Amino acid sequence: MLDVVEVRYLHDYVLWLRFDDGNEGEVDLRMELWGEMFEPLLDGDMFRRVEVNPTTGTIEWPNGADLAPEFLLARLRITPAR
């Protein structure tokens, strides 16, 4: 089972994620924020309140919106090695 283990807000609707399988990178969620649960996240202050829920292994926001780790990984732009 794939889990998100770390999330950081970067800018606009872009997050940096690290998964338990070692993958990490950026994901732009702007085009994913539609529907009753996700539209409140268009408010930048709300979007920045993202956290990892260690119980579910994914990211979530205070309003209960969350996204499956597999969905996030499929949209991940891999961060170049430093």
Image (tube, rainbow, N blue to C red):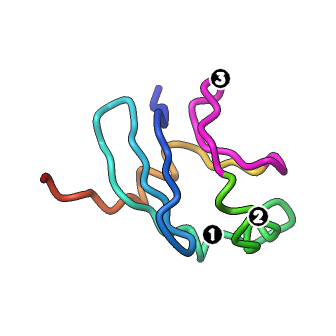
| Residue holding disc 3 | 55
Residue type pointed to by label 3: Thr
In x, y percent, where is residue 50? 65, 50
Going from the N terminus, do you reach mark 2 or mark 1 first? 1
The magenta region covers 50-64
Q: Is residue 59 above or below residue 10?
A: above
In x, y percent, where is residue 21? 32, 31
* Local SS, label 3: loop
Residue at 38% in and 58% down: 76
* Residue 61, magenta (yes or no): yes
| Residue holding disc 2 | 38
Residue at 38% in and 29% down: 20
In x, y percent, where is residue 64? 81, 46
| Residue holding disc 1 | 32
Viewer-proximal residue among 49 and 22: 49
Residue type pointed to by label 2: Phe
C-alpha separation, residue under disc 1 versus residue under disc 3: 23 Å
* Residue 40, magenta (yes or no): no
